[in-house]
Image (spheres, rainbow, N blue to C red):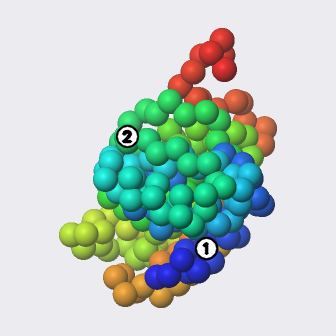
Amino acid sequence: MEHADHVALIRGGVPGPGGLWADIGAGAGAFTLALADLLGPDGKILAIDRDERALRHLATAMAARFPAVALRTIVADYTRPLDLPPLDGIVAANTLHFLPSPARAAVLTRLRGYLRPGGRLILVEYNIARGNPWVPHPFTYDTWETMADRAGFGDTRLLARRPSRTLREIYAAASEVPSHDAPPYSGLSRADR
């Protein structure tokens, strides 16, 4: 897929320019760059991945293509608690399929806690229930609707689909934290905020 495909997949889930977003499991940053394109110069992005080398590559690409977008790279495992400020959105592109169901449910609850009320989680995933050694635990959009609901998200909707050479089709979906939710967990006490 090209940059335009990445942008087209997530465009419907990004409400407008600006805001503070995170890309979990960012890797070399294909979807971080797409997010930067959509957020514009008022956007701020936290790119989180365990691979420091990939994040360095991402930082170089961002500086060249979207120098006005603020990027902070964080070398960390997104499946463990992170010290993040309240976020407007999170992109989880081709990353949750590495986790089996029980671990994925715990991570989704944690991700929801990082989001402000009304914040969005944009998921990009292969639309198939059976994986392979490289994509061990993919899940369909129908399964995502159920998972998102169980994790406390609302307003889940399909954003886009694209053919995939790897596993037939890839989709993007957006889910929101209900606006009436309590303030999200940020890893900081109220006195520290």
The answer to whether mark 2 and mark 1 are in CB contact below 8 A is no
Residue 90: x and y in percent read 58, 51
- In the rendered structure, which disc, 2 or 1, sits on the residue that comes first in sequence? 1
Q: Which residue is mark 1?
A: 7
Element marked by disc 1? helix
Q: Which residue is found at the position 53% from the left and 71% from the top? A: 141
* Quadrant of the drawing holding the C terminus: top right
For label 1, count other residues whose C-alpha is less than 10 Å away and answer few (under 14), some (14-19) or many (20+). some
Q: Which residue is found at the position 50% from the left and 38% from the top? A: 110
Q: Nearer the viewer, residue 152 or 56?
A: 56
- The relative height of residue 192 versus residue 186 in the rendered view (above or below) is above
Residue 25: x and y in percent read 41, 54
The answer to whether residue 20 is left or right of residue 53 is right
Q: Which image quadrant for residue 168?
A: bottom left
Q: Which residue is found at the position 38% from the left and 42% from the top? A: 75
- The relative height of residue 143 versus residue 52 in the rendered view (above or below) is below
Q: Which residue is found at the position 28% from the left and 65% from the top? A: 136
The answer to whether residue 149 is left or right of residue 29 is right
Label 2 and label 1: CA atoms lie apart by 25 Å
Q: Can see residue 159? A: yes
Q: Which mark is residue 76?
A: 2
Q: Which mark is residue 88?
A: none
Kindly identify the amino acid type of the residue bearing the numbered disc 1.
Answer: Val
Kindly identify the amino acid type of the residue bearing the numbered disc 2.
Answer: Ala
Q: Which image quadrant for residue 127?
A: bottom left
Q: Can see residue 150? A: no
Residue 112: x and y in percent read 58, 43
Q: Which image quadrant for residue 115?
A: top right
